[in-house]
Amino acid sequence: MNRIGLFLCLLLGLLTPGYAQQLYKGVVRDARTREPLAFVSLAVQGTKQGTLTDLDGRFQIKATAGQTLLVSYVGYQPRAVRLADEGDLLRIDLVPTVTQLSEVVVRPGENPAWAIVRNVLKNRSRNDPEAYSTYTCKTYNKSYYTIDNFVTDTSTEAYRNQVKRRPYSPMLMEAFTSQMHVWLKESVTEIRYQRPNQRKEIILATKSSFPGDFSMGITPTDFQPFGFYQEIIQLPIMERNYLNPIAEGTFSRYDFAIEDTLFHEHDSTYVLSFQPFPNKHFEGLKGVVYINTDGYAIENIIAMPADTNQKVWFRVQQQYQRLGGRWFPDWLQTDLKMPLAKSSTKLDVLIRNRSQVTEVQINPILPMKSFDHLTREQRPGAASTPDSVWQRLRADSLDHRERASYAMWDSLPQLRRIGRFLHGFSDVMQVLTTGTLEGGAVDLVVADLLRWNQYEGTRLGLGVQLTPPPLPWAKLYGYAAFGTADKALKYGGSLEANLLPRRDLRLGVSYRQDIAEPGQLTSLSQSLIVLGRPQPRNWLRSRMDSVQAWRVDGYFRPLPHVQLNLYGWREYRQVTSYPYQFSVESVNPHRFYNSELGLNVRIAPREQMQKAGKLETILAGSFPIVDVQVAIGIPALGGQFTYTKTVVQVDDEVVSKALGTSRFRLLGGWLNGTVPYPYLFGAPGSSAGGNGFYYYSPNTFQTMGLYEFASDRFAYLFWEHNFGRLLFRLKTKYSQPEISVSQHVGFGQLSNRKPHEPLVFRTLEKGYYESGLSVYNLLRFPFMQSLYMGLGGSVFRRWGPNQFPLARDNYAYRLTVTLSI
């Protein structure tokens, strides 16, 4: 063809728009709710050209006018859209089918989807981010709390009275339902990871629409796992575990169906739906997973709870990106919906967290200084990042409602009352996570305000801590308390210097004039954990000593998850309220001087800690946790007793896909030397006598008296296995029994009993055995419409050589109260 002919052909092509490709953009939505649909398949008919929508339902695709766009999505009727000449924004609405997922069917032979899932499991180690040696990335996170599906009956008297009391309430609801979000939160984090347990999240910038926010920076791991390959999918914000459909043994639990196959230029994507088989009693998920044949990796996944009785609904959506032959999270989004109702008003609280992952590096070399004991740390000044910097940090711009969420809290005077409520809520969250309430220069220690036990009665007190302005590395603490039953004043204080924060190197000195229960163990775990299961045994304590003590402590972390505490103390202790005398020559039978040097070691390889400002708290306590104490009595420091002591405590939890969760505590101790009763090991009993109902006190013998046994060497095992709802599941939402079995065992001996007479206590040479059966959530009642309050009970039986002659005396009954979704 000559040049003139070639020119005419090119000109004809330019003048024939019907055959020229152009870029079509659009959005796919649910036809009924108008909600955008993520990961919808769009393909140009007759070609291998196709794409998927993003998390906002948006797409763009090149095609020629006149061609047909085939749109398909699991749970929706497919559509064919003929493309017009104009490249206007396409709005495609899909109509849901009657059933959101395919019915479970019995197929002849093997399910064809199984071969695909087997390949995913085979390649899990090369596609799971947690299986990489190291990685680093940054995330931009945006979370909002908003009101959805608001309905109120304006004809009721309750509504009229509300408007009469608060004329501005209709305006406020209009603002919250259509103009702004109740709470908008943004953060930018840097994430470092090193297999198996080293993780560091640095909050570089954080911004909240509400000034009193104590939630710190939001990160993806608060709402969903960073990757969807774990055997157990843990949702920290839900406090519930779900069995992953992409896990070993899944074919006996989940049904899979091939819904679609998307063809690309070099690979293809299988679209599989999944849901639990009928009558399977486990916490399961349902949804859709997209498997790319390049490495048989998860490309996209949508998962939600299969339990329709669950009060709090959620949906997890994850999108992955291909990086040099590997796959890594790209976008993460979790939606949670909690229903609330009051009289004639109903609404849903919708929480959405979205994270974009950028600047990913896989298997970089990370120096040891990249990690320390803090899993999450907020950089100084992160909360004061200027708006000009946020314009650059955001993955996408804020929409009108999001911008209004920042502006309207300050511009609407009617929001101030709600603002005060949210300030109070933020203060409560701070108390729950740190045990303190910030008051500017002085922080209030909430645990010191009010306590109760049988010896002191009501203990009223005040505890404060502060950092002196000239000494930013120091912390001062002081307290005073008074018991209404013992009529005694207690007080104490401490000074601590943080010399090397990255290694948690601290030195402290303290003094206290207080009371102490005899025979109690101490460990670093007890001093670190602020939150945890309540210990009702503390309310029953009736035997106390008066103690005056000086103590010096040094703390250090040689490794991020290993903490050392070298200590020394000297105390004067006096027996007060129980008939005891120590029958040893040259020692007062009721008053003792003792001094001790010791080393505490705590190992918690999976524990997560956070720091914001001057507050440092445990973000998540993960097992195993090992506590070791080695100590010696030193008469040269003013004490009267020579001894050596070793105590070991191991806490662990094992989660089984098929059997539930086992949690156990193993303790052992050995003391060599003759010491008074207060320094022996008291067995942890929690029965105050009688057969009435009491609250369950974890890691104690429920049928054993508080001061029934003592020893100078011991071994205890506390084991509880919760089957959850794996054994059976009722169809009614008002009763969802969870069965738990317990076994507690104790051994102990005392080398020399004579010095402790006439005090009556027993030893455990022949062993102590206790078995229990618990039923949680036997009855469930809606609580605030978004949760269930569950009532249940436990029964424990004492058996073996130390059981009582009367059968009824060997039983203990406990009441259990739980909150669940």
Image (cartoon, rainbow, N blue to C red):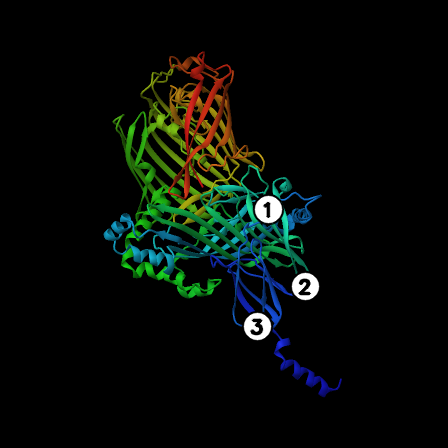
Would you say 323 lies left or right of 444 here? Answer: right
Closest to the observer: 535 or 398? 398
Circles 2 and 3, Cβ within 8 Å, touching? The answer is no
Kind of residue sitting beneath label 2: Glu
Kind of residue sitting beneath label 3: Ala
Q: Can you give x and y, in whole percent of width and height, for residue 433 in the image?
A: 40, 43
Circles 1 and 3, Cβ within 8 Å, touching? The answer is no
The first of marks 1 and 3 along the sequence is 3
Q: Can you give x and y, in whole percent of width and height, for residue 171 in the image?
A: 30, 58
Kind of residue sitting beneath label 1: Glu
Which quarter of the image is occupied by the C terminus? top left
What residue occupies the far top of the structure in this picture?
Answer: 805
Residue 690 vs 816, above or below: the answer is: above
Q: Can you give x and y, in whole percent of width and height, for residue 482 in the image?
A: 27, 31
Label 1 belongs to which residue? 103
Residue 84 marker: 3
Label 2 belongs to which residue? 265
Q: CA distance from mark 1 to mark 3?
A: 37 Å
